[in-house]
Amino acid sequence: MHPTEPDQAAPPYDCPICSRLAAFRQEWREREPSWHNGPVRSFLPPEGQDSVRLLVVGLAPGVRGANRTGRPFTGDYAGDLLYATLKRFGFASGEFEARPDDSLRLVGAAITNAVRCVPPENKPNGQEINDCRRFLVPTIESFPRLSAIVTLGRIAHDSTLRALGAKPKDAPFSHGGAHEVSGRFVVSSYHCSRYNTNTGRLTEAMFADVFETVARHLGQDS
């Protein structure tokens, strides 16, 4: 059986906390009843929480990505770049085929989102980000060997800092920026969205540099 995150770190399928997101989920359940259309649980390695040394924190599920498939970064372009890069640096193995039953496996890494439900126009509001942090905090705390965190985009970065008990000004977001925060090595990156790569804001080389920094840190930390 594939390991799952602790219940306190995962919203229930019909999580009622954010009324706007719950209504949007219901809208998609009616439009696409075969899709996941619920809060998306963290993606863990087969060995479970105790093996995780790297956590990747994204923004939120995409409508036709994780909202459809139920696995973070699965079903849209962002996953193509993320999982290819994780494989390159030894944080994943197998083949990513953009579906949750493919052979892809994480290696010493886990993936979650700052907001677990798909937001309209891919834009959660401030209250939704704050409310969903009640799940991000126990997610981080569930990994006893966690050493490094990669945050994808400013929203994920700032919410992760707050989950760690820090303020955004203590470790400002910048692509490739690295900070020690509450005993964790936090590296921020532009989000690996198609928009960012199509506009040239983020290149494959820039994204690889982030994970090379993390891999080097984890090697030194061993």
Image (tube, rainbow, N blue to C red):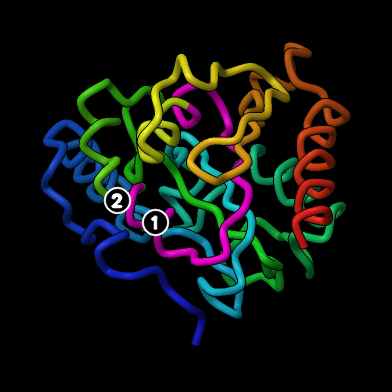
Q: In this picture, is 126 found above or below 71? A: above
Residue that label 2 marks: 135
Taking the image as shown, residue 168 lies to the left or right of residue 81, namely left
- Within the magenta stretch, is there residue 222? no
Q: Amino acid at mark 2?
A: Phe
User: Measuring 44% from the left and 36% from the top, which residue is drawn there?
Assistant: 160
User: Measuring 29% from the left and 31% from the top, which residue is drawn there?
Assistant: 129
Q: Amino acid at mark 1?
A: Thr
Q: Tell me the magenta residue range.
A: 137-157
The CA span between labels 2 and 1 is 6 Å
Picture quadrant where residue 21 is located: top left
Mark 1, Cα crowd under 10 Å, few <14 / some 14-19 / many 20+, is many
Q: In this picture, is 56 found above or below 156? A: below
Secondary structure at numbered mark 2:
helix
Mark 2, Cα crowd under 10 Å, few <14 / some 14-19 / many 20+, is some
Taking the image as shown, residue 138 lies to the left or right of residue 43, namely left
Residue 175 location in percent, x, y? 69, 20
